[in-house]
Image (tube, rainbow, N blue to C red):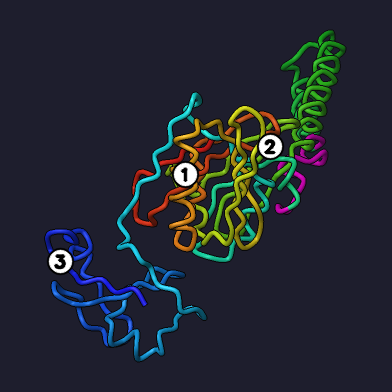
Amino acid sequence: MNTHKINSSFHSDFLNEKRQDPITGDLIVEGDEIVFCQECKSAFLKSSWEYLNEKHCNQSRTLSIFPVKKVLNLKSKRQYFKAHLHSISDWKQFDTQIKTLPWVLSSLDMKEYKREKNNTLTFGKVATILIIFVVLFAISVKNNLISYSLIPIGLLISMLIFMTLFIWTKVLSKDTTFVVDKNNPTISLEKDQIIVFMPYKEQKVTLAKYKVEEIELIPKEDNNYKLRVSYKGGTIFFSMNLNRISLHGLIEILYDWSNTVKIDLTKMKFLVSGMTDYSYLYASLDEEDENPNLLLP
């Protein structure tokens, strides 16, 4: 069992967190002797740890070094890291803290929407308009408002109007309406056009927060490594190019915090044309960090 005595000179950041003992609920203050569970990093008063028979998270290991907040701030030749996601539709599989999402309608998730034909104009309405025009023309001829010599021209104009309305109706009827749900408006899509449906105006929407289950660095060539992050529901790969010093720092930090890493999956921008999914991914070692250190487009 590794114990640590709280000293305000060395542990001011920890004291500012106003941590409480998970068992007694007592506030941990200067002079207290505490123990950190190595698995979840929870801080226990020594007496509480002994009360638990020196076991937590189904293990008895404790941290030998007092943990401090570490910031993962990597530098490389590239200013970003590339994240390969399965597809936008896979994001719906997350089971924690999922919010209302703005979706990019793409070939991957079109199936999630109900497809309906746009029937706002029908051929019956076109025929009605044409009949009204012909009746008005006939009344005008009968009452000598229009010369009989203009009848051929009138018929020609009627045919042109009919063809114009016919083509217009046919084009409109090809439009597809995607119904998202009863509470949201529908979207009319023209052929081969992709638009974005956003229930809210925010450009930044957190889709999910999830706990990483496993982290693995896969070595490649010339200091190029692939970071495999496994979480409940899938796997994300980060491709990166790091120097040796940064790599060792990364490994140390990731393994120290592997049980508390939170990744915010955040959509930042949207394509308005094309069939390509566009997404951003934030990775942060601190759940409350408003400026995550990894920006992964």
Q: What element carries label 2?
A: strand
Residue drawn at x 60%, y 46% as measured from the top left: 217
The dot on residue 250 is 1
Q: Do the residues labelled 1 and 3 touch (CB within 8 Å)?
A: no
What residue span does the magenta drawing correspond to? 112-127
Does label 1 or label 3 sit earlier along the sequence?
Answer: 3
Residue drawn at x 19%, y 61% as measured from the top left: 11
CA gap between label 2 and label 1 equals: 46 Å
Q: Locate residue 186, reporting x and y percent.
A: 62, 48
| Membership of 85 in magenta stretch | no
How many residues crowd around disc 1 within 10 Å: few (fewer than 14), some, or many (20 or more)? some
Q: Which of 219 and 275 is in front in this view?
A: 219
Q: Label 1 sits on what residue type?
A: Leu
Q: What element carries label 3?
A: loop
The dot on residue 7 is 3
Residue hosting label 2: 189
Q: What element carries label 1?
A: helix
CA gap between label 3 and label 2 equals: 64 Å
Which quadrant is home to the N terminus?
Answer: bottom left
Q: Locate residue 81, reporting x and y percent.
A: 54, 35
Residue drawn at x 84%, y 8% as measured from the top left: 149
Q: Locate residue 283, reporting x and y percent.
A: 47, 47
CA gap between label 1 and label 3 equals: 29 Å
How many residues crowd around disc 2 within 10 Å: few (fewer than 14), some, or many (20 or more)? some
Q: Label 3 sits on what residue type?
A: Asn
Q: In which quarter of the image is residue 138?
A: top right
Q: Do the residues labelled 2 and 1 touch (CB within 8 Å)?
A: no
Q: Label 2 sits on what residue type?
A: Leu
* Between marks 3 and 2 in the image, the one whose residue lies nearer the viewer: 3
Does label 2 or label 1 sit earlier along the sequence?
Answer: 2
